[in-house]
Amino acid sequence: MQNKFRKLYKPLLGFLPRKEFAIITGARQTGKTTLIEQLKEEFDRRNLENYLLSVEDPVLLKALDDHPENIFQFIPQPENKHIILFIDEIQHLKDPSNFLKLLFDKYHGKLKIYATGSSAFYIDKKFKDSLAGRKRIFRLNTMNYEEFLEFKTGDDKILDELKMIRSNKNYISLERKRIESYFNDFLTYGGYPAVVLSNSIDEKKILLKEIWHSYLKRDMTDSLIKNEDKFYNLLKILAHQSGNLLNMHELANTLQISAPSMERYIYVLRKSFHISLVRPFYNNIRKELTKMPKFYFNDLGLRNIIMNSFNPVFDKVDKGAVAENYVFLRLAETYDLDEIKYWRTTSGNEVDFVVSTSFNEGFAVEVKYNSISFNPKKYNKFIENYPNYPLSVRAYESTSNKDSILGL
């Protein structure tokens, strides 16, 4: 990853003058450690005093659990100087909120902390204090398609072409076939950094399998889930049904587990950043909160390894679901999850995504594998009821940037 930076790098760099501490979270293996190492290199270049410590070191862990100020056994105490401290895997601390609160209240302005934490589930349980005004959360996802292209090719020209395809619906790119070829790779193997940087198909699959079995197992261990088989079987079911309604009762019956266990499993998958839920769109907020959400995977490579399905997109039985999952990921790059909804009536009318950009207005997107199959008349009820949410189609196979998921 030399000389290549994730999109989160610049915001974190620009966050240095702020008094709050930065907490970088996200799924395991998304590159959080690499990111803080790159920040450290930049601060070294600027001759800023900084230190990097990992809480996975048992000696450090014990000392910090005994008292937060024991950190100064490992770094100089900030007196009349400013010190930057990077802490990797802060979720291992017994009480990370108390640790950060004490150091912020006593040393803010002199001590700046950048901390990483792999599992939001673990952090949620241990961050007993909200740390309001003392922290900002930064989430590092697996690579989006733009980052994928940059890391895969290192070619600024192809990145500029992608930007033109996205910004100009009439633009005809001479690089389109190359961009589409890489896009198929992205939809198949996803955006985990190690997977992206591997040029071997077999190695990509091995790395994805390790993420599925080894790192997901650590999420289970951290969250005290004991029945591995049920948890993995749930993942297999979800992988085959991404974009569907999340029927907790039906899933619990299928797996022969209790409703509380099912809720726990879904909670862990969400808080470990493996799946996201999309709520229904209604004018009545009470009704919205009682209806089932839809769910999507946060990385298509993980979904595909669970299914053991690595055919090209055009050769997949569920190619429409792959396109829809990608559109969700693309929307989630720009909009908060609370702003992304779906619309469905009891009679079966449905729109895949309804995005609110301000009060009572936004846009809607229906996703198809091929734009030819889009029939606007099927969506008349939505169009009539929600004129402030203009509807468009996005498709994997399309003749124009306006309709293509690449152009989104």
Image (cartoon, rainbow, N blue to C red):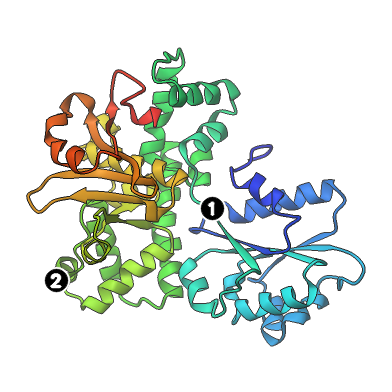
| Residue 312: quadrant of the picture | top left
> What amino acid type should be assigned to the residue bearing mark 1?
Leu
Left or right: 102, with 164 as reference point: right
Q: Residue at x 77, y 81 (%)?
A: 70
Q: Is residue 97 above or below residue 352?
A: below
Q: Is residue 294 above or below residue 265?
A: above
Residue 140 disc label = 1
Q: Secondary structure at mark 1?
A: loop
Instruction: Select label 1 or label 2 by which is in front.
Output: 1
Badge 1 vs badge 2, beta-carbon distance below 8 Å: no
**Of residues 128 and 184, the one drawn nearer to the viewer in this rendering:** 128
Q: Is residue 182 above or below residue 327?
A: above
| Residue 114: quadrant of the picture | bottom right
Q: Secondary structure at mark 2?
A: helix
Closer to the N terminus: mark 1 or mark 2?
1
As measured in the structure, the alpha-carbon distance from the residue carrying label 1 to the one carrying label 2 is 34 Å
Answer few, some or many: residues within 10 Å of disc 2's Cα (few below 14, many 20 plus, some between 14 and 19).
Answer: few
Residue 253 disc label = 2
Answer few, some or many: residues within 10 Å of disc 1's Cα (few below 14, many 20 plus, some between 14 and 19).
Answer: many
Left or right: 368, with 221 as reference point: left
Residue 25 seen from this side:
yes
Left or right: 177, with 1 as reference point: left
